[in-house]
Image: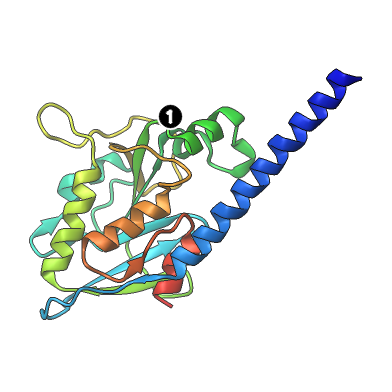
Amino acid sequence: MKIIKKMLKGALWITGTLLVFIGGYLLAERVLSRSTVAEMPDGLPRTITAFVLSNGVHTDLVLPVVAAGKDWSRTFSYEHTLSKDTGYRWVAIGWGDKGFYLNTPEWKDLTVSTAFKAVTGLGETALHVTYYRHLAEGLRCRKLLLSEARYRKLAGYVEASLDRDPSGQPVAIVTEARYNRDDAFYEAKGAYSLFHTCNSWTNNGLKAAGAKACRWTAFDRGILYQYR
């Protein structure tokens, strides 16, 4: 009986600790994601349109394929997509856990191993790149207006997230995992965790560009709130 009581006490302690952690995490995320890091004025004309795009969980930075002397098709070749179409206007770029991206096309495909690696930072990461012909502003697609200087900072942030081969080229991931005919995956730097999620990456990109952002966020809602 004593052993059973000790086991029950241990289970209750673990459960209580876990509930406190989850509650604290969600409360901190709520507060910090609604707290604004103000835009840093640069006094330059805002001539470049970009977007933050959410699928309801995950956010991408959406940039013009060609702007301010930067052609993203040279970084993320059209040849790496199934369509190989060259008529796109926009490129959506998201960062996240590689195993989650490649092995979890739907929530029903999520495994304990993939989830554990994702939340603990033990897995590798990837950039998911999707090309679009058209994009419309909406509840899950918020527009940014950037000066060329800010845009270059944002582009530099994305470039710095890429893992590269010895010749300095982005490393495309050869995989049958696709979300559509217009996307591709690339090896990335960094570790995904509860405290540095795909949405944290997007938010940090906005900070790097001097644009309005959350102090910290784990979910997409905080970023969409800032650009409501």
Where is the N terminus found, in terms of image quarters? top right
Query: Residue 125, how many percent across, how many down?
Result: 36, 36
Residue type at mark 1 is: Leu
Tell me, what colour scheme is on the image? rainbow
On screen, residue 195 above or below 191: below
The structure residue drawn at horizontal position 57% and vertical position 56%, both measured from the top left corner, is: 26
The structure residue drawn at horizontal position 58% and vertical position 43%, both measured from the top left corner, is: 106
Which one is nearer the viewer's eye here, 211 or 50?
Answer: 211
On screen, residue 137 above or below 150: below
Query: Residue 29, how many percent across, how many down?
Result: 50, 59
SS class, disc 1: loop
Which one is nearer the viewer's eye here, 120 or 7?
Answer: 7
63 to the left or right of 117? left
The structure residue drawn at horizontal position 64% and vertical position 49%, both measured from the top left corner, is: 20
- Which residue is the site of mark 1? 122
Quadrant of the image occupied by residue 13: top right
On screen, residue 111 above or below 51: above
194 to the left or right of 48? right
Query: Residue 4, how many percent across, how many down?
Result: 86, 22
Which one is nearer the viewer's eye here, 11 or 228?
Answer: 11
Which one is nearer the viewer's eye here, 182 or 105?
Answer: 105
How crowded pointer 1 is (Cα within 10 Å; few <14, some 14-19, many 20+) is rated as some
Query: Residue 197, how many percent across, how many down?
Result: 43, 48
The structure residue drawn at horizontal position 39% and vertical position 75%, both measured from the top left corner, is: 227
On screen, residue 193 above or below 3: below
Among all residues in the image, which is located at the extreme right?
A: 1
